[in-house]
Structure formats: structure tokens, C-alpha cells
Amino acid sequence: MAIQMTPQEVFLQAVTNMEDSLANTLNAVSVNATPQELERILKLIIKKEIVLEFLLEEFPMDIHNGIPPA
């Protein structure tokens, strides 16, 4: 039987997947990217980090037991 995840856990898993995908993308393009292309990708990743920070503030979670704070 599969364990059901809370909405907060689903959100954190999605964030983790996105971080992994962006890290893989950065690794893949950094080999052949021009400095301008690399700069553009890094700017997009930084923008994503800012957006995620705002989302995490709106979706607070107790990191010790995976439930929203009271």
C-alpha cells in the first residue's frame, strides 16, 4: 500500500524535482554554452529561486514533522 503524501510533502517533492532538473540542465549546457548563454541560464535559475522562496513563504511547513504550523 502506497503512503499518501500531504500537500506540503507533494509541494516539496515538486520543488526537489525542479531543483534536480535545473541542476541537470545547467550541467548539460555549461559544457558548450557561450558566456552569454550561461549568464542567461543562470539568471533564469536565480529568478526561479526567488519565486520559489515566495511560494515557500506562502506554503509554510514544519520541516521536522511535515505538517503545516499551527
Image (cartoon, helix red, strand yellow):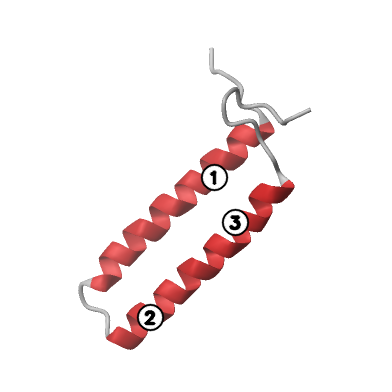
- Identify the residue at image location x=27%, y=65%: 28
Q: Which amino acid lies under the numbered mark 3 shown in the image of this protein? A: Leu
Residue 21's spot in the image, x, y percent? 40, 55
Q: Residue at x 60, y 22 (%)?
A: 65
Disc 1: which residue: 14
The residue carrying pointer 1 sits among few (fewer than 14), some (14 to 19) or many (20 or more) residues within 10 Å by Cα, namely few
User: Given the current orientation, which residue lies at the most extreme right position?
Assistant: 70
User: Which residue is located at x 69 percent, y 40 percent?
Assistant: 60
Residue 16: percent from the left, percent from the top? 47, 45
Judging depth in this view, the residue of 60 and 37 nearest the camera is 60
Q: Secondary structure at mark 1?
A: helix
Q: Earlier in the sequence, mark 2 or mark 3?
A: 2
Amino acid under disc 1:
Ala
Q: Position of residue 5 (x, y in %)?
A: 61, 26
- Residue furthest to the top in view is 1
Please name the amino acid that badge 2 sits on.
Glu
Residue of label 2: 39
Residue 2 left/right relative to 69: left
Kindly identify which numbered label has been placed on residue 52: 3
Q: Is residue 61 left or right of residue 23?
A: right
Q: Are marks 2 and 3 in contact (CB under 8 Å)?
A: no
Which tag, 1 or 3, sits closer to the chain's start?
1
Q: Could you give the CA–CA distance between mark 2 and mark 3, rounded to whole angstroms? A: 20 Å
Please give the name of the residue rendered at 46% of the width and 47% of the height, measured from the top-left corner: 17
